Image: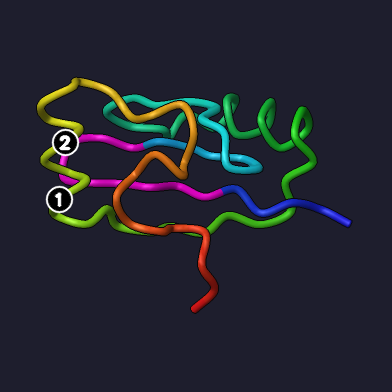
Amino acid sequence: MGKTGLILYTDDWEALYVDGKLVAEDHSLEFPIDWVIWTNEYGLTDLKNIELSEEDSEEICLTGCCPEDITDFKTDYLKED
């Protein structure tokens, strides 16, 4: 069974999490070759885009990066809708 990658994004930043761990982050994660590599390396079969909360977005602006573990955000992005 494949995995779902979570793309957490804000106005000027995107981060890809797989199994709750940060895989990549940048101003834009739109380069097709990277997606081919990540899909193969992590067995991704689906991607879910989630906008960061204002609180988490502000924290990224202050620190300049996303946390290594998705559970370190103030918002629970792993909960099911």
Residue 57 image position (x, y, % from top left): 18, 44
Q: What residue is pinned by disc 2?
A: 59
Magenta region: which residues?
6-14
Work out which quarter of the rendered image holds the N terminus and state it.
Answer: bottom right
Q: What residue is pinned by disc 1?
A: 55
Rendered image quadrant of residue 77: bottom left
Residue placed farthest to the bottom in the image? 81
Foreground residue among 8 and 37: 8
Give the CA separation, mark 1 to mark 2: 6 Å
Residue drawn at (46%, 26%), measured in percent from left and top?
68
What kind of residue is marked 2?
A: Glu
User: Is 60 one of the magenta-colored residues?
Assistant: no
**Secondary structure that dominates the magenta span:** strand
Residue drawn at (29%, 50%), measured in percent from left and top?
74
Residue placed farthest to the right in the image? 1
Residue drawn at (33%, 29%), measured in percent from left and top?
66
The kind of secondary structure element at disc 1 is helix
Residue 46 image position (x, y, % from top left): 66, 57
